[in-house]
Image (cartoon, rainbow, N blue to C red):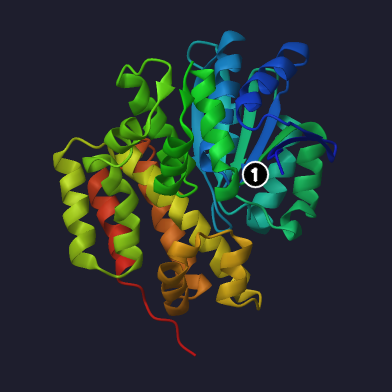
Amino acid sequence: MEAMIQFQKNFKFLEIPEIINDLLSMIKQIEEKEFHQMHLIHGAEDLLILEAQDEIRSNAYNLGFTERSRFYFDARSNWDGIFAELKSPSLFAEKKIIEINLPLGRPGKTGSVALLELMEIITADHLLILICGKLEKSITNTKWFKAFSARAQVIECKKVYPSQMGGWISRRLRDKGLSIDKDALAMFVALTEGNLFAAMQSIDRLMLMGIDQRVSLEDVNDCVADGAHFDLFQLTDAAISSNSTRTFNIFKRLQKEGMQPFEVMRVINWEIKNLFSMSLDISCGNSIKQSMNRAKIWQSKQQLIGNFLNQVNHQYMESILGQACSVDKVIKGAAAGNSWDEIGRLLYMIANPIRKTA
């Protein structure tokens, strides 16, 4: 299946045949024809979600929305702060973007009511962006989701599966004026194992190498599989395998070699989202094997992932996801703390899971 990004308006989906690359141009085309005051971005692919946010912000900035406020909520959050923000005038009388991050897509009873109220009081000086992860069908059937979808531009960023990675990488390289040899593409796909963030970082590194038109097997070996960059792929594997010593050796090496916290978290978050989705599937009665097959986990990683999922329950995965959200807040300046310390705590939670009880 080629189309993995769909736009939803009043529950009608438009399939985009050229995945991801067309996402940004499609948003731009839609915004040029009709300004949307509310946006809902959700899905399983973090890179696409981030790119959609960036494109919407860029378009909004050109329309005078030069201020931005960000909020992070879950089912237990107090929503009073966002209402105060909407009611408080800007010091410079500028238009403002209001971003609501709701990673689990579950606002709770209070949050559901708050979202419905927000839709009624938002003014022309506000642009509202609601950002969620992958949403279960039960959430898309809720009153708040249906009401929001009916009035917002809804962008669903579907998962790019390993079998589709080759086409994705080829298109991204083509957009940058490069082609790639068949054997080089096979190695590229094998090394990145369906991780869009890792693939995109590798493509950026290839561009810095000054390659002339065609990417070779040697280029991929030099770029994708080298040093600190490849350590990113190994970091979460070490944590998931409960190898604390190896996990923190890689972690410290990444720090010393100048890797930035947000780069490390891109890879960790990608893995956590997959684990969370599978643990939820298992909690609903499916077997570990069924869950991994549904998530299109590579055969080479199934034993590693399966052993981890056999040790933890969904409640513990929720606590891991909660810590990941805390790290994100610190990195973005929305909460006090040291980014590296918070990432270390997150890795410790993954590498030293609380074993599930019968």
Q: Is residue 348 left or right of residue 176?
A: left
Does residue 135 sit above or below 206 in this rendering?
below
- Name of the residue lying farthest toward the left: 256
Q: Quadrant where the N terminus lies?
A: top right
Give the answer, above or below, for where 68 lies relative to 294: above
Q: Position of residue 27 (x, y in %)?
A: 68, 22
Name the residue that disc number 1 marks: 158
Residue 134 horizontal side relative to residue 237, left or right: right
Q: Nearer the viewer, residue 181 or 158?
A: 181
- Decide: few, some or many residues near mark 1? Use Cα within 10 Å; few <14, some 14-19, many ≥20: many
Assign a secondary structure to mark 1: loop
Q: Position of residue 20 (x, y in %)?
A: 61, 31
Q: Is residue 108 visible?
A: yes
Residue at x 49% of width, y 90% of height: 358
**Between residues 212 and 324, which one lies in front from this camera angle?**
212
Find residue 163 and report its horizontal and vertical position in percent. 59, 48
Q: Is residue 89 visible?
A: no
Q: Left or right: 129 with respect to 318? A: right
* Residue 196, placed above or below residue 174: below
Q: Residue at x 54, y 39 (%)?
A: 166
